[in-house]
Image: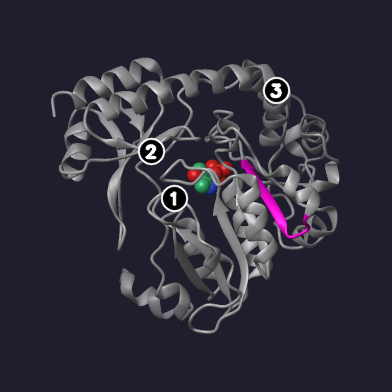
Amino acid sequence: MTPTPTAARHLVRPDIAALDGYVPGEQPQGGDWIKLNTNENPYAPSPAVARALAAAAAGRTLAKYPDPLATVFRRRAAEVLGIDPDWILCGNGSDDLLTILVRAFVGAGECLRMPYPSYILYRTLAGIQGAECDEFRYARDWSLADGFAAPRTASGADVKLAIIANPNSPSGTLLPPARIRELADRLPCALVVDEAYGDFADTHCLDLVKENERVIVTRSFSKSYALAGLRFGFAVAQPHVVEQLLKVKDSYNCDALSIAAATAAIDDQAWLTDNRAKIVATRRRLTDAMRGLGYDAVDSQANFVWCTHPERPHRPVYEALKQRGILIRFMNYAGWGDGLRITVGTDDEIDAFLSVMKTI
Ligand SMILES: *Cc1c(COP(=O)(O)O)cnc(C)c1O
């Protein structure tokens, strides 16, 4: 007998049955797409990564369980960041760290606060906990009012965790560390600063972690280190906070290959500096060209640019590009509006994108 899909709804918790699962951007497997839709880095990672992977795959390394704490990575990352290794918690991508954080801080009936529009996964993670997600709107200039730090929601739920993507997606905008500090001081709970795009920005919030035990920063290897396929990220928090989070993570959440590869990647800071310079230069060119085509393109601190057109509808542009083998992200935020999020590709990819845009 073939089970009917609806029957499963009665097997799972009502919270889960009611949930809209998170839908990632399109990841076509195969084909000759120009992918400007999920903020991957268009360049190959540091060559040191392939060497580290080959070494880790040889011999008996893979026969053993990996180090649960990814100690070699934490030692090297701590040197690069100027902190101690016990301030670092590693994860299977920063999505894994966000899952650990929400599970650790937010219980059923409590509340997770996030700005809107931002990374939709936070909402899904709150839903899995049976928690409320309070989405507080950015102002039209992408600033965030003090109300973001209110201790309770309108319905009376206690805010137990706030998460701000900084730089934000889809806008690419950055709240300065001084503003993050003010919000952290006012909030009644921990504040996660999701710096998945932090390496492309002018500033970051690592110093706030040292000042305030309630600030936690997360970083990803998917964007700035060109390792989205590897799945590795880390969080920076005060050691006694890390100690609590360790109880929540899976024992072996990072595999031996990803630990070796991420250690080689963070060791090659020259690669990061060079890659960042290329992305920032192409980002400038893409922003100016979109403005030349009549779009409002927001100045970005990330590896993508958020564009809206004052008159023309956005979805047909996304569709016309797709027909020509170019994927960008069409986003429609209820109560806010829609727009196009374009990842900064190579110069050739952006040239191909712009030449199609001129014909649409
Ligand atoms: C891409 C992204 C992540 C996820 O990063 P992974 O390390 O690939 O899990 C987290 N937060 C934001 C805002 C992102 O855009």
- Magenta residues span 212-219
Q: Label 3 is placed on what type of residue?
A: Ala
Residue under circle 1? 142
The quadrant of the rendering that contains the C terminus is top left
Res 219 → quadrant: top right
Residue under circle 3? 52
Q: Is 259 in the magenta? A: no
Q: With 129 as the anchor, is 8 left or right in this view?
A: left
Which secondary structure type mostly characterizes the magenta part of the structure?
strand
Q: Is 328 drawn above or below residue 18 in the view shown?
A: above
Residue under circle 2? 298
Circles 1, 2 touching at the beta carbon (< 8 Å): yes
Residue 8 in the image: x percent, y percent? 39, 74
Circle nearer the N terminus (1, 2): 1
In this rendered view, identify the residue nearer to me: 196 or 188. Answer: 188
Give the residue at x 37% y 45%: 25
In this rendered view, identify the residue nearer to me: 101 or 288. Answer: 288
Q: CA distance from mark 1 to mark 2?
A: 10 Å
Q: With 259 as the anchor, is 211 left or right in this view?
A: right
Q: CA distance from mark 3 to mark 1?
A: 41 Å
Dot in front, 2 or 3: 2
Report if the beta carbon of the residue with label 3 is closer than 8 angstroms to ligand 1. Answer: no
